[in-house]
Amino acid sequence: MKLSHIEHIGIAVKSLEAAIPYYENMLGLKCYAVEEITEQKVKTAFFKVGQTKIELLESTDPEGPIGKFIEKKGEGVHHIAFATEGGIQNSLDELESKGVQLIDKSPRKGAEGLNIAFLHPKSTIGVLTELCEDPNKVNC
Ligand code: ZN
């Protein structure tokens, strides 16, 4: 199991339109992509800070995962995503064999064409954790 860096931090917001100006005008970041992920019922906006990204998540459906999160906890940090090295499936298999509960037993497609998988917050001391792998940089 090897993580190379924090790929992104996912932040749940009620409205991208309301949140983007804060990141651009106050923090001086530039939104370089807005993408809707229909299966996850979210619209995302991305900013880069070094090699780490900020991923804003706006729900497109109150019954979707981000809609439910905001209803329960309000806006704020939703998840941390680590970039894996050596194959995301290998990392998932290793974690599962060590007793970590997985939300995704095998990777699926996330924003920006990354392969992603979530670990269950029950097993991660309260932090929803995502593993990512750039399929263009797979070296396993
Ligand atoms: Zn994410």
Image (tube, grey):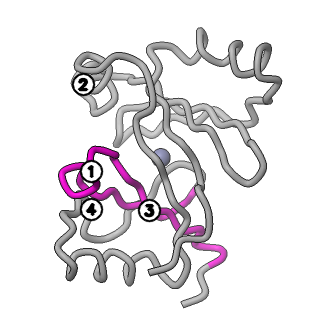
Identified by mark 1, the residue type is: Ile
Task: Report which residue position mark 4 lands on.
Answer: 104
Residue 11: x and y in percent read 49, 31
Q: Secondary structure at mark 2?
A: helix
Residue drawn where x is 29% and y is 58% of the image: 119
Q: Are marks 1 and 3 in contact (CB under 8 Å)?
A: no
Foreground residue among 15 and 41? 15
Q: Which residues are magenta?
A: 113-137
Which of pointers 4 and 1 indicates the residue nearer the eye? 1
Left or right, residue 116 beside residue 126:
right
Q: Is residue 76 above or below residue 25?
A: below
Which tag, 2 or 1, sits closer to the chain's start? 2
Q: Secondary structure at mark 3?
A: strand
Q: Are marks 4 and 3 in contact (CB under 8 Å)?
A: no
Task: Report which residue position mark 2 lands on.
Answer: 68
Task: Report which residue position mark 1 lands on.
Answer: 125
Mark 2, Cα crowd under 10 Å, few <14 / some 14-19 / many 20+, is: some
Residue drawn where x is 57% and y is 37% of the image: 55
Is 24 included in the stretch rendered in magenta?
A: no
Q: Residue furthest toward the top?
A: 18
Residue drawn where x is 21% and y is 58% of the image: 123
Is 136 included in the stretch rendered in magenta?
A: yes
Identified by mark 4, the residue type is: Asp
Identified by mark 2, the residue type is: Lys
Mark 4, Cα crowd under 10 Å, few <14 / some 14-19 / many 20+, is: some
Mark 3, Cα crowd under 10 Å, few <14 / some 14-19 / many 20+, is: many
Task: Report which residue position mark 3 lands on.
Answer: 131
Which of pointers 4 and 3 indicates the residue nearer the eye? 3
